[in-house]
Amino acid sequence: MIITFSLIALFFLAVIVVLQRAHVSDKSFTDYAVADRSFGAGYQAMSFLNTWWPGSIFLALTGLAVSDGVTAFYMPIYSLLTVVLMYVMTDRVWHWGKLFDLKTQPDLFALRYNSRTFAIIGSVVGILSGVPWLVLGFKGLGALFQALSLGAIDATSAVMIGVVLMAIRQFWTIRMGMRGVVISDMFQGIVAYIGGSLVILGLIAWLIHSHGVGVAALSPTHLAAPGLFATVGPLYFFSLIFSGVVGGWCWPATFVRLYTADSVRSVQRAGALGAPLSLLFSIALVVLGLLASLLPEVAAAPDLAWFTVCRMAGGPLLLGLGGVVVLAGTMGNVDGNVQACGAQIANDIVGAYVTLDHKRAVLSAKLGMLAITLVSAWLATRTISHLVTLAILSYQGIIQLAVPQYLGIFWKRGNAMGSILGTVVGFILAIYLQTSYPDGPAWAWGLTSGVLALGVNAAVYLGCAVLLPHADAERQRVDNLFALTDGRLATPNAATARAMPQTCHNT
Amino acid sequence: MPHTPTVPTPRSAHIWIWFALDAFLALFPPVYWVAARPKPTLFGLPCSIVYFGSLGIFITASLLAAYRDDERRGAFKSPVSAGSALPLSVPENMP
């Protein structure tokens, strides 16, 4: 226990040293919210990975592979497709962000749809949906500290330790804003995904050489994904990947990565740099889970497979290192979510009603982050029944932002009415279907509640686009917005795109 | 600075086709109904593991190829430069 907790303490101190040395006073709210769009590809890649793969993935992905076999590969695959999606949408999103000083995802909605109402809806949906996942992140550290204590600490105390540690860590997130998040993501990302990959590969080698296990020994059920005749439905696996891909960029913390880069090139280069690492890390993690499922000790407790294998292979030292990579991943994920929530509270909710100068905007964001941290930490210490169900519900809900987000970026005809109606109808329908059919409607061939609601959402959006076409002024404004990113309109003329909304009807 | 519009040549068709294939191979149900099975074995490995491993490499390779293509065609000579930000244009008045 001394060894494992010492390693955790050393890592935590190293993160604090990195943050203290990197502190720079923010010059503007843009500086605080998106680090003045100053980061290159390396930071972008690590920042994306640190937000995308939470620390709990070490437990969740190995656990899923142990219990459900190759089905777990859906995560690596949708994660890579998400990077492809980032690659094709970055150009327009980043340029609009730079030209119009966009700082959050709802800022983009406000610009594209000329609607603050929809921006507020998007912001509230993003924040509310994120809280259950933040609470899960805090709680996940309980499992970490219980495992690292080798049973000496009970579950409740372990959760408390995790909550206190993560709450202390948020002091620097609140103080430094996005710059602190991205800089610490680099260090945490190197530990979690490069260090983590080395540990994973070492564990795979150990399993093969010490236990003689191989994929050929796996049962046929572990080697098949849900297929045409699966009890969960033939389209279930499609639903998992599809909702993962379109939902990925609906999370505020993920989306804002597009605005922290210093150029489109940096975002796209980050994709090219991050994808191979993401591929290696996640595929290896699934393979580790598959091989470890052949060990009786692991099969008995799939959710703890990561810690069990670390302990078996390398005793307390490797268990401690396994804990450090989980903590590194968790920190990056929680920091990113707290920061994004705070920025949206200041920029899109408070800022929608009150004009905020730089200092007041930063103060609002800091207070928002503090509130989110305290609420999540407090909830994590409570026993909340159905917390996981709540988190799944929130995921099915937030992916409803995908329709106005992607169609708004790639298609000119969508309008504010369609985005508001579609999102609200989709959100309510997703929640209704998920609560009525927790395992998915039997009549839907495996389509999940979120994907079914997305279909209705898209139909509403498209219907409004067809039945309620843009007025001439709005059509011109949207044309100009798109023209800005395909080289047909030089930047000074952006004033046209900028000025038009003020004369248009504001939905 | 110069807001000189730069119009790079369009992204190569083969990159778009490659991206479309990424989505098709990962999302079109009949593909995984057939491929994500234990049999046959390929190179001594179950078909499902070969399918998912190859698909991951295929998607990653498409991103590397796209980045290389974008560098080659001058897509990163952006018309947007530092200091060109305009304030967000949405009306202050709330609905």
Image (cartoon, rainbow, N blue to C red):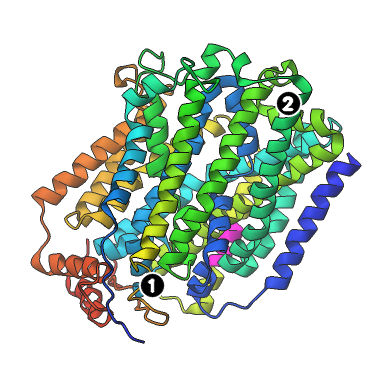
Quarter of the picture containing the N terminus of chain A is: top right
Amino acid type of disc 1?
Lys
Badge 1, how many Cα within 10 Å: few under 14, some, many 20+? Answer: many
Q: Are marks 2 and 1 on the same chain?
A: yes
Q: Residue at x 82, y 52 (%)?
A: A9
Magenta highlight range: A365-371
The reply to whether residue A394 is visible in this rendering is no
Which residue is label 1 attached to? A98
Q: Is residue A454 above or below residue B4?
A: above
Q: Position of residue A175 (x, y in %)?
A: 64, 68
Judging from the image, what secondary structure is the residue with disc 1 in?
Answer: helix
Can residue A54 be seen by looking at this rendering? yes
The residue at which mark 2 appears reads as A207
The prevailing secondary structure element of the residues shown in magenta is: helix
Nearer to me, A272 or A57: A272
Q: Residues within 10 Å of mark 2 (few under 14, many from 20)?
A: many
